[in-house]
Structures are given as C-alpha cells and as structure tokens.
C-alpha cells in the first residue's frame, strides 16, 4: 500500500502568526504544557518561533530541576503569577540572597517559555 | 491665628473706597515635589494572587520589627519562626496578624444557597467578643491569647509578640510591639506663615444643595473675594489646597438605572455627569488662583481598589487647562515647601473603624502610624491592587503632616516620636456634613478648623 497522502503534500505548512504565535488548532495556551511534553512541543516550537536563533539549545533537565527547586523554596515567597526572573529580582531586593546561577540560567534561556514562566501546577493556571 | 491677623482691619469695610485698591499677591510656592510615584500604577495586571503582597509586607517589615523587639525586650531575646517553636520557651515571633471574625462579611456565605440566608446588612462595626487572633508567618499559624487586645487589632498588621507556646498549641503572649514610627525626615519648613487648606467630602451632586453655599464661600475666601483687606491678605498666605476625596456625593452612585429596562433609562443621565460639571466649575475658580491637588475618594469616578488612580483630565476640561490643577492618587505624598505631607481619603481609616474597637478616627490614624503601615486591612477587607514586588503602603519615612479625609469631626494632634519625629495628625472632616475645612500652618505645624456655615432653617438670622 502506498504511503498515506497528507494534505500537507499539496498544501505545504506555512508559518502564520496566530495570536501569540501559537500553531493553529491549539485551543489551550502554553500554560498546559508539562515537562514531559517538551519533546512533543519542540516540533511546534521549531515551527512557531523560527525567528529565534537556531544555535539556541534546549535547557537540560538538570537545569529545569534546579529551577523547579527554586520555585518550591519557601524563603523567596510565592512562586505563582510572576515570572521566575521577577521572583528572583524581588528576592534580591528584599535581601534574601537568592543563588546567582539561577539568574544566569534564566537570562540565558529567556526565550524559552518553560524556563522563564512561573511554575504552574498541572492543569491549573497561575 | 488666621483670623487674628484679619480682625483689626475689619473696619476697612466701612471706609470709603480708596483711590487705588490694594493688591495682595499670593505667596509664591517655593518648592513642590510629588512623591507619590509608588502609588501610581502603570500597566495593571490582575492575574496574580494576593499572597504576594502579604509575603512582601512581612519580608519588608521583619528587619524593622526585629530591631524594635530587641530594643524593647533586650538584646538577648530569642527570635524564632513558628516552625521552630518549642513548648514553654520564651521567645519572640514576628508575623502577620489575622483576626477570625464571625460577623465578617464573606462572599461565600452570601452565595451559599443551601443556607437560604439573607445577606447580612452592612453594620457599623463587625467586632464580637468571640473574635480570635491568629499569628501567621511564612509557613505556619498559631492562635494567640494573653496580654493582647483582640478587639483592637485588625487583620494584616505585622507585629512581634513575646511569650511562649503552651501545651495546647496556643501562644501565650506576655507583650507585643509594633514597628513604631518610621525614621524622621529632616525639617526644611518655611520661616514665615504659610497655610495649606485641607478639605474633603465636598459631596457635589447630592440631593440637597445646602453645602453648595458653603463650598462657594470656601472658594471665595481662598480666591480673596471675601472679607476686608485683613482676610484677603491672610488668604494670600494660602499656598495650596488639597481636596482629600469624595468630591462627588454618595447619591451619584445610585445604581437604580442598572436594574431598570434600557428603554426607560434612555434619556436619563447618570447623576455623576452633572456633579462632575459642577466640580469642574469649582475647580476652575480655584485653579485660577491657587495650586489645587485633587485626590479621588470612595465615590469618585476612578478605580475602586487602593491605590486609587488620579481622575482623568478629560472629565475636567475647563479646569485642566490650568497647570495649577494637579490630579493625584489616593494615598498622596508630596513635599510642600520642605514639609512632607502624606494622606488618604479616609477609606483605610474607616475600614479599620469597622473591624476594630477603636472609635476615634484620630486614634486610628495614630495607630496606623505606630503600626508602620497605611492600611493593614488592605487586601482582606479593603480592595487593593495585587502588588508583588513591594508593598507601597509600608511607611518608610515619617511624614510631617499625616491626614485622612472624610472623618466625622475635625481633630488634630501633634505627635512627638522617640527619635525626634514631629508629626501633625489631622482628621479632615466631611465638608458636606460639617462645612469645615482645615488650615495647616507650615511654619509651626499647627492646624485650625475653618467653618463656612450658611443660613440654615433652624438659625435665627
């Protein structure tokens, strides 16, 4: 049996800016993405954010784990509703001395929404 | 003060007019600096929870409270977090207060249909003997009992308690302390008499027009059209007017038209439209002569949550042509001729009044200064913007004049602090009810009321 034909053979998929650059068909926004969906989303990330520099590598799981631990540490205040960088800077201003490597990692990966955005519980918004 | 200088020349009204009428130039403004940037919100995002503001408030006030605790109870006291408490050990804990009140209006109770409850009517005070105080820090909470006045304190205050944990899990308080007055500001006040007029609660747009005569008398006095040469020369020493909220009356808030059908209300105009036009004309007369600061209040057309943003200048087309009109935020802070003013339109004080046993507005005003926070009840029972970075209501510097608007009576007090702070506390009365405004003398921080009563129905004249 021949290979199943797809409609994208005749009509190639074009990048179209839709709202915040989401691919068509995704009703829920990026808040629903969990870490293990990262691989699935990487395909869409490539299509969505073509404008990003191609040399940017995805952050490794150890970094994400460190960020998650930063979110959960109670010394720096609540973590929901604000970006991790905002939380880091707030902790800095209050004199709580948050660890420096976190800020460097956040600035290095500032384009990646999994890194910068607030850590959300599964399925619920900030 | 004001009238003593004016009185001797009262005979001038009976004299024939002089060839050249005397002119009294208004005293020039030496320095004005608007310090209310923390209260101005740029882009507002409400997608945050209020946990942030409590966390920042506690983290911001904790160092000051630990310092106060050490100075009050000795340098060798043990400071503990609630998670580190040991039963029976005397220690000091810093945390946020929460008062569990049975009568506190709760939206969940109101919409709970299974109880079939009629929503509670608004009460003047919601305190009850069965209220309890709970201290919370970042992780835990504990009930407080002992030498602490449950009725007097309100939710959201940051304080330090000294005592020990009992076996039943409650904390027995032996003493408590607040953040105390913030550090003083240097005094650069003027050396000659300069007055600032504080008025609040003009109440335009109300059904009765009795207060309109008094408002017009106020405007005429300030612009120098009233009285003999003595009064006019005194009025020339008024350098600024601050209108502390409630420029519109509560009647303009009537929501009857919302429940009626559209075809019935098509031709009716909102009551606030007419009231704002009147306000515009009054402000026009004032701003041609003296700088005016207009703060919004509870019934004014701006946002409800604190800090209230300035009224928009498109509502006041006539008056906003003058640069002397300043539309400012609700907690308002400014340096006038070297004297730091800080004040609100009274929502914070009246909210504390509802949830505390304190009855006197001046006492509550002094208490907020001692507690180091303008409105501790802010997200709990008073609407507040969900700040996350810092709490702008924490008092970091001690103002020279601290006022609140829309109080039932005029009261003032000069407070002396331990570190040399001198604060003039003023409760500005509601003008539509009392026809009284306040004149603050910047030279010696004294305050006097000035009443403009017209001819009432029960007066003899």
Image (tube, coloured by chain):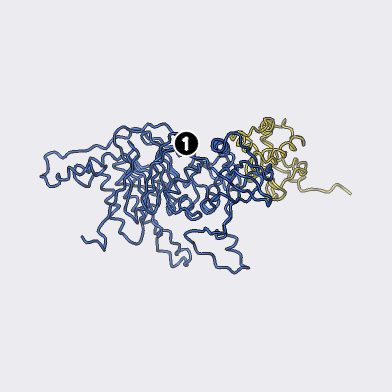
Chain colours: A yellow, B blue
- Label 1 resides on the chain identified as B
Instruction: Examine the image and state in which quarter residue B111 appears.
Output: bottom right
Q: Is residue A30 visible?
A: no
- Asked if residue B24 is positioned above or below residue B249 in the image, the reply reads above
Taking depth in this image into account, of B134 and B277 the one nearest to the observer is B134
Q: Which secondary structure lies at badge 1?
A: loop
Q: Is residue B452 visible?
A: yes
The quarter of the rendered structure image containing the C terminus of chain B is bottom left
Q: Position of residue A22 (x, y in %)?
A: 67, 45
Q: Is residue B332 left or right of residue B219?
A: right
The quarter of the rendered structure image containing the N terminus of chain B is top left
Taking depth in this image into account, of B57 and B42 the one nearest to the observer is B57
- Asked if residue B445 is positioned above or below residue A100 in the image, the reply reads below
Q: Residue at x 26, y 37 (%)?
A: B26
Taking depth in this image into account, of A61 and B211 the one nearest to the observer is B211
Instruction: Examine the image and state in which quarter residue B230 appears.
Output: top left
Q: Position of residue B51 (x, y in %)?
A: 61, 46
Q: Position of residue B223 (x, y in %)?
A: 26, 44
Furthest toward the bottom, the residue is: B116
The residue that disc 1 covers is B397
Q: Is residue B330 left or right of residue A21?
A: left
Taking depth in this image into account, of B219 and B373 the one nearest to the observer is B373
Q: Is residue B88 left or right of residue B395?
A: right
Q: Position of residue A56 (x, y in %)?
A: 72, 32
Instruction: Examine the image and state in which quarter residue B453 appears.
Output: bottom left
Q: Is residue B86 left or right of residue B459?
A: right
Count the numbered circles shown: 1
Dot 1 surroundings within 10 Å: few (below 14), some, or many (20 or more)? Answer: some
């Amino acid at each position: 049996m021949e290979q199943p034909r797809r409609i994208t053979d005749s009509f190639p998929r074009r990048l179209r800016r839709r709202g915040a650059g989401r691919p068509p068909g995704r009703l829920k926004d990026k808040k629903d993405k969990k870490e293990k969906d990262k691989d699935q989303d990487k395909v869409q990330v490539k299509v969505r954010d073509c404008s990003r520099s191609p040399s940017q590598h995805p952050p490794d799981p150890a970094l994400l784990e460190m960020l998650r631990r930063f979110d959960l540490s109670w010394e720096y205040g609540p973590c929901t509703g604000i970006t991790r960088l905002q939380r880091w800077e707030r902790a800095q201003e209050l004199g709580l001395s948050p660890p420096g490597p976190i800020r460097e990692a956040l600035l290095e990966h500032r384009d990646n929404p999994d890194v910068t955005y607030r850590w959300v519980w599964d399925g619920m918004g900030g | 003060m004001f009238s003593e200088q004016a009185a001797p020349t009262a005979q001038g009204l009976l004299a024939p007019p002089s060839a050249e009428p005397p002119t009294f130039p208004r005293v020039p403004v030496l320095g004005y600096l608007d310090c209310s940037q923390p209260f101005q919100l740029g882009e507002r995002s409400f997608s945050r929870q209020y946990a942030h503001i409590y966390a920042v408030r506690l983290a911001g006030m904790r160092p000051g409270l630990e310092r106060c605790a050490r100075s009050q109870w000795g340098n060798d006291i043990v400071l503990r977090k609630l998670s580190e408490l040991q039963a029976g050990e005397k220690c000091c804990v810093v945390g946020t207060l929460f008062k569990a009140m049975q009568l506190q209006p709760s939206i969940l109770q109101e919409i709970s249909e299974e109880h079939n409850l009629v929503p509670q009517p608004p009460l003047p005070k919601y305190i009850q003997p069965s209220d309890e105080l709970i201290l919370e820090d970042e992780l835990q909470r504990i009930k407080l009992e002992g030498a602490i006045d449950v009725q007097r304190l309100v939710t959201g205050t940051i304080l330090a308690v000294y005592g020990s944990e009992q076996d039943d899990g409650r904390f027995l308080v032996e003493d408590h302390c607040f953040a105390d007055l913030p550090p003083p500001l240097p005094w650069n006040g003027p050396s000659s008499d300069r007055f600032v007029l504080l008025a609040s609660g003009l109440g335009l747009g109300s059904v009765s027009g009795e207060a309109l005569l008094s408002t017009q008398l106020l405007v005429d006095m300030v612009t120098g059209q009233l009285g003999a040469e003595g009064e006019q020369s005194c009025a020339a020493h008024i350098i600024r007017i601050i209108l502390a909220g409630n420029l519109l009356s509560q009647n303009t808030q009537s929501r009857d038209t919302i429940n009626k059908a559209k075809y019935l209300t098509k031709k009716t105009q909102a009551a606030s439209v007419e009231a704002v036009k009147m306000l515009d004309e009054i402000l026009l007369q004032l701003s041609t002569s003296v700088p005016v600061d207009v703060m919004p209040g509870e019934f004014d057309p701006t946002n409800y949550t604190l800090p209230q943003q300035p009224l928009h200048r498109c509502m006041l087309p006539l008056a906003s042509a003058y640069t002397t009109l300043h539309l400012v935020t609700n907690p308002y802070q400014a340096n006038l001729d070297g004297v730091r003013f800080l004040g609100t339109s009274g929502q914070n004080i009246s909210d504390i009044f509802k949830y505390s046993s304190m009855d006197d507005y001046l006492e509550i005003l002094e208490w907020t200064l001692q507690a180091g926070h303008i409105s501790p009840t802010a997200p709990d029972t008073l609407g507040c913007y969900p700040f996350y970075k810092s709490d702008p209501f924490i008092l970091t510097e001690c103002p020279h004049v601290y006022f609140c608007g829309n109080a039932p009576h005029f009261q003032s007090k000069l407070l002396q602090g331990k570190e040399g702070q001198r604060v003039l506390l003023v409760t500005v009365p509601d003008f539509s009810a009392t026809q009284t405004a306040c004149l603050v003398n910047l030279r010696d921080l004294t305050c006097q009321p000035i009443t403009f009563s017209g001819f009432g129905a029960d007066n003899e004249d």
